[in-house]
Image: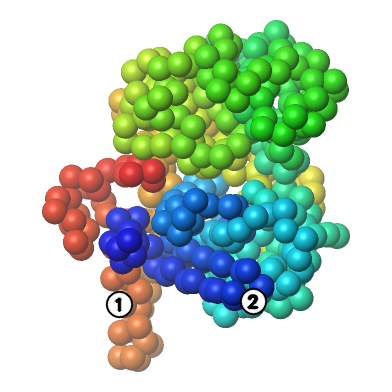
Amino acid sequence: MELFELMSERRHEQLVFWNDPDLGYRGIIAIHDTTMGPALGGTRYWNYGNDREAVIDALRLSRGMTYKAAITGLNLGGGKSVIWGDNRKANREMIFRAHGRAVDSLHGRYITAEDVGTSPDDMEYISMETEYVVGRHGRSGDPSPITAYGVYHGIKACAAIKYGSDGLEGRHVTVQGLGHVGYYLCAHLAEEGAKLTVTDLDAERVARVAEEFGARAVGADDIYSVDADVFAPCAMGAVINDETIDMLKVDIVAGAANNQLARGLVHGPALHQRGILYAPDYVINAGGLINVYGELNDWTADRSKWKAGEIYGTLLRIFELAKSDGLGPHLAANKVAEARILEAIDNLRAVLTRPGFSADEIAVLRGLFASFDRFSRPGQRVPGEKSAARGKARGIEE
């Protein structure tokens, strides 16, 4: 595995490995970009097949966080961490305290939070070793309700574009994954009168949603071929791939999972060509990031919920841009996110024209600007790239 090649492909700033064999702790922290602020992203606890899978997941997820923060208008960079192991382990305190020490070693360049396989209880353990953690009890807590609220409004925005009305009563939605976010999403959909078909590897979760919301259950592999209006992936990523894309019988793909497209530059256009409206995942699932950003800035719960509700309008603007520029929604979203990052870079570059900086300070600033060139404008050459043609919106799932 060529680590620096993988980092260069996705233009990452930093990749950190931590290991404690006595505890069984194996942690990876990926920082993609800190142009807009410190990197913030959750800790995922997952039993990967090998170390390459763990590294690639951390790199892809952290890059998505950069774009998620930018397009949502939050002054944060993108980062993510993963713990490789069985998340059903009993000795969680020592595992997460070790992870807290890893986070603390970065001195605030990375702030962690909850993600798949972790909980507010785990964030409490991390907080015993570092202050750079959000999503604890008594603060913003579990981000799942806000994430689900944002996804729900994102689905309504998609319906408004596809059907001329954002009403979901009578609409058939298939939900893949019934963890915290999937469960809360089903609650919103059922309350509005949507018809639900669901799946999850956990039979107890399926039984609960079926009983509470009248959902129909299908097998894990059968969810793709259900004839419905909306497919909402709310589990792991890469579920829109070469095998599944032709199985879909829906008008809309809009869900909470990260990195839903196995290959963004292939499967995004494939959805577009089939007439399936895709809500870019890092836009529609930004509620969790909004929730923890609110904690950092002392927002009320109502303000965080209101901000998550803005995902509706953000998606409408992306769909409008996609239509006017002849792009798929995933590329239009990238274009909007990169424009905000470039604006921040321009503002920082303007600092160099102001008097009063020493030669050493200017040298430091020039070094920072050199690292920012990963985000090129059309016609600009990105160091290390063969062509500047990709300066338009680059797919984050390349």
Position of 167 relative to 368 (above/below): above
Residue closer to the observer: 224 or 130: 224
Q: Which residue corresponds to the image point at 73% horizontal and 72% vertical from the top-left?
A: 94
For disc 1, the neighbor class at 10 Å (few under 14, some 14 to 19, many from 20) is some
Residue closer to the observer: 144 or 224: 224
Q: Position of residue 70 (x, y in %)?
A: 49, 51
Report the residue that reaches farthest toward the left. Answer: 386
Q: Is residue 129 left or right of residue 51?
A: right
Mark 2 sits on what residue? 22
Which part of the image, by quadrant, shows the N terminus?
bottom left
Q: Which residue corresponds to the image point at 30% horizontal and 77% vertical from the top-left?
A: 366
Q: In the rendered image, which quarter is residue 230 located in?
A: top right
Q: Nearer the viewer, mark 2 or mark 1?
A: 2
Whichever of labels 2 and 1 marks the residue nearer the N terminus, that label is 2
Q: Which residue corresponds to the image point at 75% horizontal and 29% vertical from the top-left?
A: 203
Report the residue that reaches farthest toward the front. Answer: 22
Which part of the image, by quadrant, shows the C terminus?
top left
Q: Amino acid at mark 2?
A: Asp
Query: In this rendering, does residue 29 appear at all?
Result: yes
Q: Position of residue 279 (x, y in %)?
A: 50, 30
Residue closer to the observer: 281 or 45: 45
Position of 261 relative to 385 (above/below): above
Colouring mode (rainbow / by chain / secondary structure / one colour): rainbow
Q: CA distance from mark 2 to mark 1?
A: 43 Å
Q: Position of residue 211 (x, y in %)?
A: 85, 20
Q: Amino acid at mark 1?
A: Arg
Q: Secondary structure at mark 2?
A: loop
For disc 2, the neighbor class at 10 Å (few under 14, some 14 to 19, many from 20) is few
Q: Secondary structure at mark 1?
A: helix
Could you say which disc has been placed on residue 366 in the image? Answer: 1
Q: Position of residue 271 (x, y in %)?
A: 39, 22
